[in-house]
Image: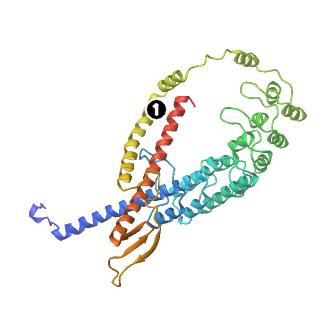
Amino acid sequence: MCFSPKSLKVPPLWTKSILAFAYLCSLFLTSLWADANTDLQHALARADIAAMEKAIAAGADVFAPYYDYRKEILPNESTFSKAAEKGNVNAMMLLLKKVHNPTKEQKALLSFALCRISTRLYQRLPDSKADEEAKQAEQLAMAKGLVGAGADVNFRNGTPLAWHVGNKNVTTVKFLLTKKAKVTDAAVFRAATFSSGKIMELLLKAGGNPNAIDADGSTAILKAVQDDTDALQVLIKYKADVNRPYKNGLTPLNLAIYAKYSNAEEILRAAGAKDAPLPENFAKNMTAAKAAAKPAARTKEQRHAENYKANKRELDRIKAAMDRLAPKIHAIEREMLALGAQVGNTGYSNKAATGMECDRQNQNCRTTYQGGGETGSSYVGRKDREERIRKLESERRDLVFQYDKLAREYDQILEGK
């Protein structure tokens, strides 16, 4: 059967109008949703809990993708991981209230955040023992909240436990172990490197391998010789092989003698470690390295030129990103100045309201301020300007933060750090 153009039914004009209106409404709602997500992420960056609550009430998605300064999605990042990084327990608890029956993908984001708690627990050094305990209590609270919401303690083959071991937080490690966290060789190795004998005991008691080996072939006991004699004693208690050599033939006792770790040497000998010759060429190579002449000091300009040549592509990328941010910052500052604000201040007027004067019909209202009165219309205009200035200042602060971060990264690469 053939159809002619006349046989096709064309929707009437009013139907097209409704469809067009529905499409525009969907775009509008999508834009509001995107703005709410951005507001939530900006509020989190400022640690502004009230603004976070407002953004969530406006429809922000706590699992929304997180973008970097280039507007590219950061894999696995979310408001949860950012709150975990900052150690902001109040923000984390607020976000967790919005989690109900998470999907597999959302559970992965929660699990990633569980790993990120530890990365910035010590953004500054604790002022006291009580301060350190308070920080660790916050870390434990966030870990419990995330696990309760659906985070996997064995995410990426036990990564959360391995990371938290490095924080020396005994209570969080205990909590993860009670949740059946897998004790990997990586966790045992990190305990030998960063932690104490108490955490090492917890791991080995839970089934950890005392002869754990890292990707480079180094053993946990070899690492404990260098970093932690308490962990060394616990490893020996759980039958670690004190004579197991590194891949180049270096034994734990070799290292203790050569590096003059007298306490570790005494512990190893008491545990039955045997004397063994140093690996071939080991002592010779170490002596030669120490005796090698130090390179001539370079000037700052020479160092920068060499580092720029070696990292030109990365530095050019950072510089281009800074060049994109600078005009945006300047444009915001010009608009703020045009509105009467002083750049850097979050407020518009320092006047304080002392009263309101209106006639019976509430017309021609005048608000009395220190320094003079104003009409109702000027009051509304001034409040609108104040709100606009606050929004501009928030945007400016975020852009300046991004710019400064890039500038520091640029300088560090030039310095070779």
- Whole-percent x, y for residue 9 in the image: 15, 67
**Residue 105 image offset from top left, x and y in percent:** 50, 55
User: Is 99 on the left-hand or right-hand side of 376?
Assistant: right
Q: Position of residue 290 (x, y in %)?
A: 72, 18
| Residue nearer the viewer, 161 or 131 | 131
The amino acid pointed to by label 1 is Leu
Rendered-image quadrant of the C terminus:
top right
The residue at the far front in this view is 371
Displayed quadrant of residue 226: top right
Mark 1 — residue? 315
Q: Residues within 10 Å of mark 1 (few under 14, many from 20)?
A: many
Up the image or down, 114 lies above or below 6; here it is above
Answer yes or no: is residue 177 visible. no
- Of 382 and 404, which appears nearest the observer? 382
Q: Is residue 287 visible?
A: yes
Query: Closest to the observer: 294 or 118?
Result: 294
Question: Considering the image in quadrants, where does the N terminus appear?
Answer: bottom left
Name, please, the residue furthest toward the right: 270
Using residue 271 as the reference point, say whether residue 121 is left or right of it. left
Q: Is residue 364 above or below residue 352?
A: below
Report the residue at 56% width, 64% height from top. 94
- At mark 1, the secondary structure is helix
